Amino acid sequence: MSEQELKLHVPIHAQKTVEKAVRTARAEELPLRAMYFDTPARELAKAKVAIRLRLEGTQWVQTLKMPGNNAISKLELNHDRPGPILDLSLYVGTPAQAVLTNLDNPLELRYETDVVRVFRKHRVAKGIIEIAYDRGVIRSGDLELPVSEVEFELQNGSPEAIFEVGLRWLEKYKLQLDLRSKSHRGDALATAAQNIKQAKTSTSPQIVRTSEIDRFWAPRKARPYQINKNQNATQALIATTEECLEQICFNAGPLAEIDTLGVVSVGRPEHVHQLRIGMRRLASNWKLFGKIATLPEPELRAELKIHLGHFGATRDLDVMLETIVPKLEAAGMPHIQFEQHESVRTAQEIAQSVAFQSWLVKLLKWTVLTPAIDPIPATDEAAEVTEAPAAMDMAIDVEDVDKHTPLQESTTKAAEKSPKENTANSQPPLLIIPLIPSTQPKVTLRKQLEAQLNKWNKDIVNHWKTEDKNDIEAYHDLRKKIKRMRYGLNVYEALHTDSNLGFYVKRLAAAQETFGILNDYSTTHTFYRQYTDAYPETWFAVGWLSANLETCKKHADEALKELPKRIKF
């Protein structure tokens, strides 16, 4: 069977109210203890498969889960068991058989979960869903991770019902989107516990433990997109959006202190950096696919810019404090403590905000509910409107055409018939609408992307033909174009894995690095310039940065000249 569910993290402040909202007179409570299995080399986890034995009240149930066709769907195979006995023969003839028969090592217990579930049915106009609140722990070795989450699982109806109720609960109780399943967290916890256990015989077990905990909460970097040449533009955009959303959410979690609030702070500037990369990749993809794929609604796209700006303010401050201020102080500027630093919203506050979390859920909703059909180009649509009536007017019954009469003459004769006669004898052309619309574009996706990327490259190399070099904003615009191109090439390389763009990518990366330094110096210059009246010491920074900005501009101009006029795909 296939299950569709939306899972939201319930922070400490909302746990009692959420449990009360679920625990109505019709609610049930069920203790759930589960054991999850995998090989020592994590072969199932790498295949995105999870298998468990769970005691549900007094009944043991064996469950295997595999990825479904979107981010909220999973293929789930359940079998009642007489006891805690794992029986892999149950999967003969199922989609899981290939994965299990190709395992190189036997399965072993990796981690356990121990939660109490309170659940009930909830009916809305678009379907019936089960709302379940889970609270407990995930355990492996001597490591534990708290579980506090509410799940909205579709029982009947449209997936829209899940998002309708989920968004309402998120806004009311200030919940947070968490794309990590229990098996995802358990697998990472088991790996950490295994490494810590092996280090107990070493001379520095505590160092290893600290390192493993840091690794568990490490920033999530960008990963290659999973797209192929048979997908149309909209399918490819949905796939790339799912990857970007995962990168954003996996970095927003530590920043929002999901699972760690009140225990330990794990969010770092690098999480902000990687989260913003995910958001910029997303914005770049929307531009890349803008004319060939179905895009999210304008409001959703506009909201991205708002949240990107909020996180950008914290990122700019972090970069300034960590990289440029030390250089200024080494050059002779006295240390300055700005009280205004406190006015900047922290990354934690932004990540926890209802506005940002709601945006994440709406974006997830778009990936799930958007039909994977490319929009019809306006030119094609216009042609259909103007040409179809003409084609119908010219329709001729084969029997009315004299074998020796030229086609043009036959057509004229047919047109000269009376309206009544034409109506009686003419038939509209046969039209069969396919069960599933074709997802294969007339022009291959690869060629469409190549055309767009070359257009972007032309815009970059010709930037100064229309822009003023005395305007620092023109340099910032060029930096954004370069970054957009870099992210666009990531999509192309995922689609065409045999592409040989090493030379161009190397030049582009060098330009991006140079323009990034220029941006950091410019941002810091703007920051200090606004405080020259209140803090006269900042004039030192303004002068030092002004001189360095001119050098950075020269380096940027040189890097730009190294880019080829056209990309050789």
Image (spheres, helix red, strand yellow):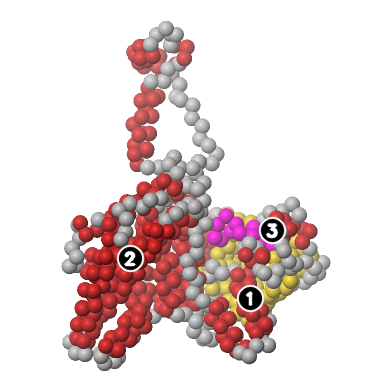
Query: Is the stretch drawn in magenta largely helix, strand or loop?
Result: strand
User: Which corner quadrant of the image does residue 288 belong to?
Assistant: bottom left
Q: Is residue 157 above or below residue 108?
A: above
Crowd around label 3: few <14 · some 14–19 · many ≥20 (10 Å): few
Point out which mark residue 99 bears.
3
Q: Earlier in the sequence, mark 2 or mark 1?
A: 1
Residues under labels 2 and 3: Cα distance?
44 Å
Q: Quadrant of the N terminus?
A: bottom right
Element at label 2: helix
Crowd around label 2: few <14 · some 14–19 · many ≥20 (10 Å): many
Element at label 1: helix
Circle 2 or circle 3, nearest the eye: 2
User: Which corner quadrant of the image does residue 328 belong to?
Assistant: bottom left
User: Bounds of the magenta span?
Assistant: 63-75
Q: Amino acid at mark 3?
A: Val
User: Which corner quadrant of the image does residue 115 belong to?
Assistant: bottom right
Q: Is residue 371 left or right of residue 520?
A: right
Residue 302 visible (yes or no): no
Q: Earlier in the sequence, mark 3 or mark 1?
A: 3
Residues under labels 3 and 1: Cα distance?
21 Å
Q: Amino acid at mark 1?
A: Thr
Q: Earlier in the sequence, mark 2 or mark 3?
A: 3
Q: Are marks 3 and 1 in contact (CB under 8 Å)?
A: no
Q: Position of residue 470 (x, y in %)?
A: 17, 67
The single residue placed furthest to the right in the displayed view is 82
Identified at 44% across, 11% down, the residue is 400
Q: Are marks 2 and 1 in contact (CB under 8 Å)?
A: no
Q: Which residue is mark 1?
A: 191
